Image: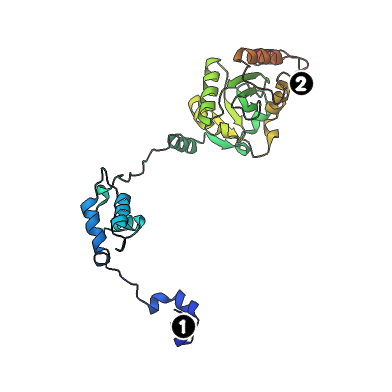
Amino acid sequence: MRETGRRLGISHSTISRYRSGYYKKRVINIIKRYEMFLKYLYKKYDRRCCSIQVCIVLFKRYHRFERCPSMQQVYNWIQECKIALDRDDLCYKKRGKSKNRNPFMAHLKWNIDNKTVLPFSLRPKKMDLRDELGHLEIDSIIGKRNENKALISVVDRASRMLWLIKADYTYAHYTSTLIRKFIEENNIICKSITTDNGKEFETMGITAKRLGVKLYKCDPYCSFQRGSNERMNAIVRRFIKKGESLKLKPQTYLNDISHQINSMPRKLFNFKSAFEMQMSMF
């Protein structure tokens, strides 16, 4: 390219950009250039015990002065049907992409179609009146650092009723299943759910779908949108200090903590407890 550019009186970079106009692409005769290797490959290759890579290594070992392509080059030839080997002759056949590989795709489509998972801005304003039971706020409470155990706090926005759930893992699917079973087994009234954007709540749309309610996701870094939940977590910290391990905290202990908090007189309710407020709203 430099010599051509010198003779034409132009820059060699111009030749590089437009080399397709000056040069024809060189066509290599594979069968003639790698005749020895291809004969060896057709003779030795066996998809059960002698792969293409093994054939290349053995050919280089016993025919040091013969031309030998790289393994990727041989696979490219097979892909482009340039040699007498087919994809079906390979040791590992390429699998097609599965249509339903992700188990949550069906749920995601359902959530989009039925508007199950919604941003906080679309939450009805009437929920701010807090005059109806069943609108829940859910958050997680982390124990000791680098520990898989966690607590799930569920708070009713109207009565400030608290339920604590012990989670042995923080996986999204495990957490959503645990919350759904707890709500169903304890007959908790559920009309909507509000959560943050934590990874442990990524599949909460499945729980909302099975409970037949809407799930509202708070905006990032806007914990005040779940004010009741955050305040209740601070009260829970009176019993379980920050950084304390949760391994030896059974569910019965968490139920006792919830009972004590729900029995506490609250100035917000004219010194009535959450139990009394919930009974008065039925």
Q: Position of residue 137 (x, y in %)?
A: 63, 27
Mark 1 Cα shell of 10 Å, populated few (<14), some (14-19), many (≥20): some
Query: Judging from the image, what secondary structure is the residue with disc 2 in?
Result: helix
Kind of residue at disc 1: Gly
Residue 253: quarter of image: top right
Mark positioned earlier in the residue sequence (1 or 2): 1
Mark 2 Cα shell of 10 Å, populated few (<14), some (14-19), many (≥20): few
Kind of residue at disc 2: Leu
Q: Which mark is residue 268?
A: 2
Residue at image point 52% right, 20% down? 181
The Cα–Cα distance between marks 1 and 2, rounded to whole angstroms, is: 86 Å
Q: Position of residue 53 (x, y in %)?
A: 33, 51
Which residue is labeled 1 in the image?
5
57 and 51: which is toward the camera: 57
Left or right: 186 as drawn, with respect to 107: right
Residue at image point 55% right, 23% down? 179
Left or right: 66 as drawn, with respect to 249: left
Query: Judging from the image, what secondary structure is the residue with disc 1 in?
Result: helix
176 and 155: which is toward the camera: 176
Quadrant (top left, top right, bottom left, bottom right) of the N terminus = bottom left
